[in-house]
Amino acid sequence: MAIVEVVVPQLSESVAEATLLNWYKKPGEAVKRDENLIDIETDKVVLEVPAPSAGVIIEILCEDGATVVAGQLLAKIDTEASAGATPTEVKPAQTAAAPASQAPAPAAAGSHADGSVAMPAAAKMMAENKLSADQIAGSGKDGRITKGDVIGTLNAPASTPAPSAKPASAPAPAAKPVSLLPEVKAPLDPSTLMEGRPEQRVPMSRLRARVAERLVQSQQTNAILTTFNEVNMKPVMDLRNKYKDKFEKEHGAKLGFMGFFVKAAVAALKKYPVLNASVDGNDIVYHGYFDIGIAVGSPRGLVVPIIRNADQLSIADIEMKISEFGQKAKDGKLTLDDLTGGTFSISNGGVFGSMLSTPIINPPQSAILGIHATKERAVVENGEIVIRPMNYLAMSYDHRIIDGREAVLGLVAMKEALEDPARLLLEL
């Protein structure tokens, strides 16, 4: 017997622990080298843990939902065994965060003895809600019942019969070093929320919990103040309408507005470096580079991928990078490197129709720009009332190191650059 251990991969410096999401194999099943065995969620991404060697899983030491740390033993693979010939010493999965040296926890009352019927977390929820396996159609590998299947059944209207069993899911995709996978959500029929007084309790994902923690930290540790201004978007819109077709043909990316906002922000940060700085204890750290975070909504929640060295990129480069981030967020392919760092952030609530907001600073940064929906409004120019496409800008800043003067002038610099885009090319 040649045993190979499966352990939690190295996590980033800022991540202390992670949560096991879903095993794709069970004891006794054969695995191929580099085949994905389990998804592990951190507060930023979901890591796929590949099999270090081909063989048969003979022991799983941590079940779905367990809290683990880097280097912790998860499972053992016998590289010489055959599928189905599981050794007698194979142990059932332990409860969350239990060290490998402890005895495995007993199964929840009423759970099924056959581990192939329901995943551990699902079996526990089934026992608590007095559900049997024949009431739930398993969507997991080999028809196994997942926690999402149980939640979906509980949320289904009472008159709706249990769906017929689904075929086994497709094999797990090829292993990748790091990925940000979409958060799986149980189906919810909105009409059920209108009947009676129902409630649904769903635990936060690690990403959502981390976002909540950082936002509260930002509010508690920063002296946040927000300054506002308005910008006439007509010059940018005219420039975009004139060149968007040629731009897309030349660069293979659509010419949007975010490229202009990023370049305008960088121009302002160069003039007022404290907007690009951060606080470290009693020190102010001035950054000699411009890594701009772009807030993006993903299936798992809000993420902020970083456009590095934005000052060295053209508008075309920025637009292509934003397009790449948008697609990666949609597909769940953002990496730890994509999300790490940043000296200033931009949040675009306008894509959802927001007219005005006060964005919260993303620690350890000291400022963030919020942009909103562009709407035609009546404004006064040269003593006359005219119609212009106007956008309200909001910049929140840490008043501990940024005075109102720098914040207001910085936002004015962004406004001036957007209302005269030639400034961005001439660096004026």
Image (tube, grey):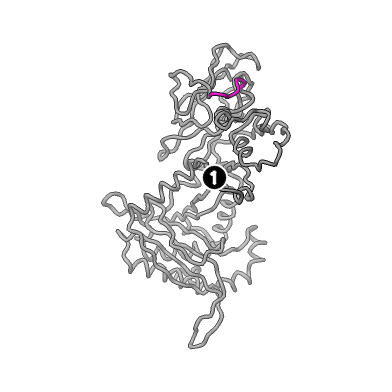
User: Farthest residue toward the front?
Assistant: 196
Residue span colored magenta = 109-114
Magenta segment includes 112: yes
Q: Quadrant of the C terminus?
A: bottom left
Place of residue 71 in the rendered image (x, y in percent of width and height, measured from the top left): 45, 27
Magenta segment includes 98: no
Place of residue 325 in the rendered image (x, y in percent of width and height, measured from the top left): 56, 51
Q: Is residue 96 above or below residue 404?
A: above
The front one of 30 and 151 is 151
Q: Quadrant of residue 351?
A: bottom right
User: Farthest residue toward the left?
Assistant: 282
Residue placed under numbered mark 1 in the picture: 199
Q: Is residue 293 above or below residue 104?
A: below
Name the residue rendered at 37%, 69% in the picture. Answer: 408
Q: Is residue 400 above or below residue 109?
A: below
Place of residue 355 in the rendered image (x, y in percent of width and height, measured from the top left): 51, 67
Place of residue 8 in the rendered image (x, y in percent of width and height, measured from the top left): 48, 29
Say which amino acid is labelled 1.
Answer: Glu
Q: Is residue 210 above or below residue 229?
A: above
Name the residue rendered at 45%, 30% in the picture. Answer: 68
User: What SS does tag 1 mark?
Assistant: loop
The chief SS type of the magenta part is loop
The local crowd at label 1, few if under 14, some if 14 to 19, many if 20 or more residues have their Cα within 10 Å, is few
